[in-house]
Amino acid sequence: MKPLNIGILSHSYLLTQGLTQILQSRKDHDIRCHGLMADNIAKQIAAKNIRLIIADPLHPAAQQIVTSKCSENTYADTPVIAVSSGVLPDAISNMFDAVISLYDSPERIFHTVQSHASGFDPDYGDKKSELTSREKEIIKGIVKGLSNKEIATEINISVNTVMTHRRNIASKLQIHSPAGLTIYAIVSKLVSIDEIRHSIN
């Protein structure tokens, strides 16, 4: 089983250490937690092979990450979970893939992490390899060159849901680039060359 590298983004030393102790205490999973600094966040994520982030939703770097996910498709394959001591406004919580509370039990925290880790890492959770009809719609949008926001608008779902589907697609197909998905979509007859000609010219 490959280790799951989790980045924790918080100004609180106690919060970082507490989450680390909870998650790394699991003997049935190889989870490794890493405290992240605000500076050069992208380099840290790449260097430490971070696959999931738990963040204080009010941390400036956390807001930068979730904003980039929605508008630029950056960090599209990296779920970001907010950790909060109270109820977050919908405008904030909807930017994150999930929210955990400081008052959640260790088991609940682990379950939330595991359920999102299973969306992209084949070593975590059981998944069917067959694509759903919604995932096929997402692929069509990707190969047509649409952004996450445009795909969400076209099929009437949230941007976060689009990103979750994209992680599931990457996990099921083990294809991590638009070019690879384009080839898959054509071979699988999800789209015709004429439909996507403008996006590949």
Image: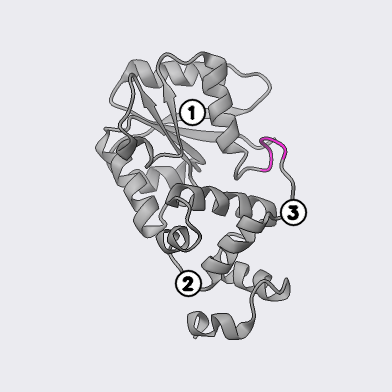
Q: Amino acid at mark 2?
A: Gly
Q: Residues within 10 Å of mark 1 (few under 14, many from 20)?
A: many
Report whether residue 40 is seen: no
Between the residue at mark 1 and the residue at mark 2, the CA separation in whole angstroms equals 35 Å
Residue 76 in percent (x, y) is at 46, 52
Give the numbered dot on residue 164.
Answer: none
User: Alpha-carbon distance for marks 3 and 1?
Assistant: 32 Å
Q: Is residue 198 above or below residue 63?
A: below
Whether pointer 3 and pointer 1 mark residues with C-beta atoms closer than 8 Å, the reply is no
Specify the principal SS of the magenta part.
loop
Report x, y in % for residue 148.
44, 59
Asked which secondary structure carries label 2, the reply is: loop
User: Label 2 vs label 3: CA separation?
Assistant: 23 Å
What residue is shown with label 1? Answer: 33
On screen, 23 above or below 74? above
Tag 2 residue: 145
Write the residue at 53% across / 35% down.
5
Q: Residue at x 50, y 48 (%)?
A: 161
Instruction: Judge whether 3 appears above or below 165 on screen.
Output: above
Q: Residue at x 71, y 74 (%)?
A: 189
Look at the image and tell me whether residue 34 can be seen: yes
Q: Is residue 41 left or right of residue 52?
A: left
- Badge 3 amino acid: Glu
Front residue of 39 and 184: 184
Q: Residue at x 65, y 37 (%)?
A: 2
- Bounds of the magenta segment: 122-126
Magenta-colored stretch includes residue 145: no
Instruction: From the top left corner, tell me how far across and down residue 185 is, in percent.
Output: 66, 71
Dot 1 lies on which element?
A: strand
Q: Earlier in the sequence, mark 3 or mark 1?
A: 1
